[in-house]
Image: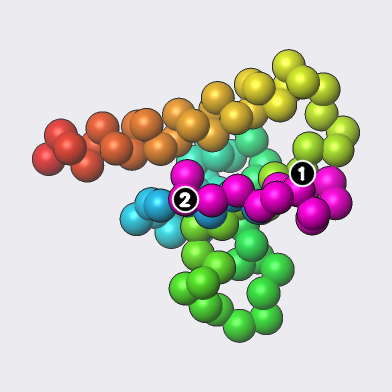
Amino acid sequence: VVSISDGTCGTHLLVKLGTDMTDAQIKKAAAERGINIACLSDFCVSSSSRYKSTLVLNYSDLDEDTQREAIRRIGDIFNCNAVRRTAH
């Protein structure tokens, strides 16, 4: 994680990641783990590297246990990716 928004985004957090994965790869990996995730680039009219690898996390209707499980599953995406990169 490079940065997390300060919570002024209402019911969402913006989480900027330091990863080589594309937004499409992140979303696919999340879906494979049962997580429906949005990236900031999904909401942009034009592409910009500024918005790459920034997750939009909606937490408004999730209880604390569900939030923890979702974050664990999202974390697994990047732990697995790091392992794959160092294994080659």
Q: Which residue is mark 1?
A: 58
Helix, strand or loop status at disc 2: loop
Q: Nearer the viewer, mark 2 or mark 1?
A: 2
Q: Which residues are magenta?
A: 1-13
Q: Position of residue 1 (x, y in %)?
A: 47, 44
Q: Looking at the image, which is closer to me, 4 or 63?
A: 4
Q: Is residue 72 above or below residue 53?
A: above
Q: Position of residue 80 (x, y in %)?
A: 35, 32
> Residue sitting at 67 percent across and 81 percent down?
45
Q: Residues within 10 Å of mark 2 (few under 14, many from 20)?
A: few
Label placed on residue 28: none
Q: Position of residue 15 (x, y in %)?
A: 59, 49
Q: Position of residue 30 (x, y in %)?
A: 55, 39
Label placed on residue 2: 2
Quadrant of the rendered image containing residue 9: bottom right
Whether residue 24 appears in this view of the structure is no
